[in-house]
Amino acid sequence: MWNEFNIKTFPAETIVYRDGVYQPELSTLSESENLSEKYKLPVHIIYVGKITGENILNINLTSSKQPVFLSINIENNFPAFLNIFIKNAGKNSEIRGHIMLKNSSDLSVNIMAEHKNSDTGILLQTKIIGEKNSFSKISGTAIIDKNCKNTKSDIRFGGLATDKSAKIVFNPKQRISSIPEFAEHSAYMFHTSEPQETYLRQSGLSGAEIKDTMIEAFIKDFNLF
């Protein structure tokens, strides 16, 4: 996973999807697990490959004190839609996710992150690379239900358009019914400045090499929570 998709693996219980399909031979937990059991190891949900059409990923955490990590690295060359539904009802449990998307067509991603108990955490960073003539729409809704105090909610968006014809739209929302420890949204567009591009050209890089350098820097620029 690390070599092919830049996914860092570590000792964990795993639920693995490739091209939108559950992979039992790579997983230690069933796809139908609702994460109601407390495991000795963290749970690592890995969703990688290429997608097309409609796709759904459900994560329902009900166990207390259970860390869950979400790693998504996908690309699409045809119109695709991905719905990610996350519910955390496990007190003192936390879900941390890095979502990396590469779009060469039309891509819509809708993330619903719902806190169902006190002292829960959902921390997500989503990044999209938009290629020539692509359209990307990333929606993220953080929901903190009633009587869910001291929650930690952070949904971050980052975008890189590799061509002027690429369009990227971010649509963040919050529905907060309890006082959280913190609830944050942020979004930014990544680009090199003119002095940086001048420096790279003077260093001998071609236009294509500068583009590759930008993409590599954008991918590696995941802020740790």
Image (cartoon, rainbow, N blue to C red):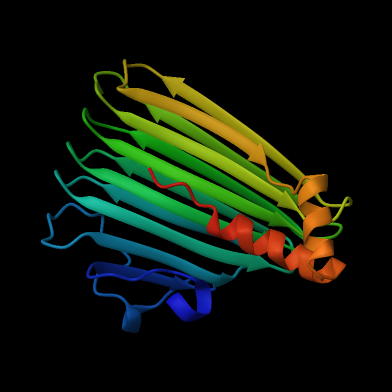
Q: Can you see residue 119? A: yes
Q: As displayed, is residue 30 above or below residue 196?
A: below
> In this view of the protein, which residue sits in the foreground, 12 or 192?
192
> Residue 42: x and y, percent?
21, 59
Percent x, y for residue 112?
A: 47, 39
Quadrant of the rendered image containing residue 15: bottom left
Depth order, front residue of 100/213: 213
Quadrant where the image shows the N terminus: bottom left
Q: Quadrant of residue 115?
A: top left
12 over 164 or under it: above or below: below
Q: Residue at the bottom extreme?
A: 25
Q: Nearer the viewer, residue 60 or 215?
A: 215
Residue 200 location in percent, x, y? 78, 61
The residue depicted at 75 percent of the width and 49 percent of the height is 192
Q: Residue 105 occupies which quadrant of the picture?
A: bottom right
Left or right: where does residue 199 sit relative to residue 26?
A: right
Of the 4 image quadrants, the one containing the C terminus is top left
Please report the residue visible at 41 percent of the width from the left and 29 percent of the height from the top. 143
How many marks the image carries: the answer is 0
For this view, does 222 lie left or right of residue 29? right
Residue at 24%, 21% in the rendered image: 149
Q: Position of residue 207 (x, y in %)?
A: 86, 66
Going by the image, does 82 lie left or right of 98?
right
Up-down: is 163 above or below 124?
Answer: below
40 or 21, which lies in front? Answer: 40
User: Image point 52% across, 39% down: which residue?
Assistant: 156
Say above or below: 137 vs 114: below
User: Can I make out residue 1 in this image?
Assistant: no
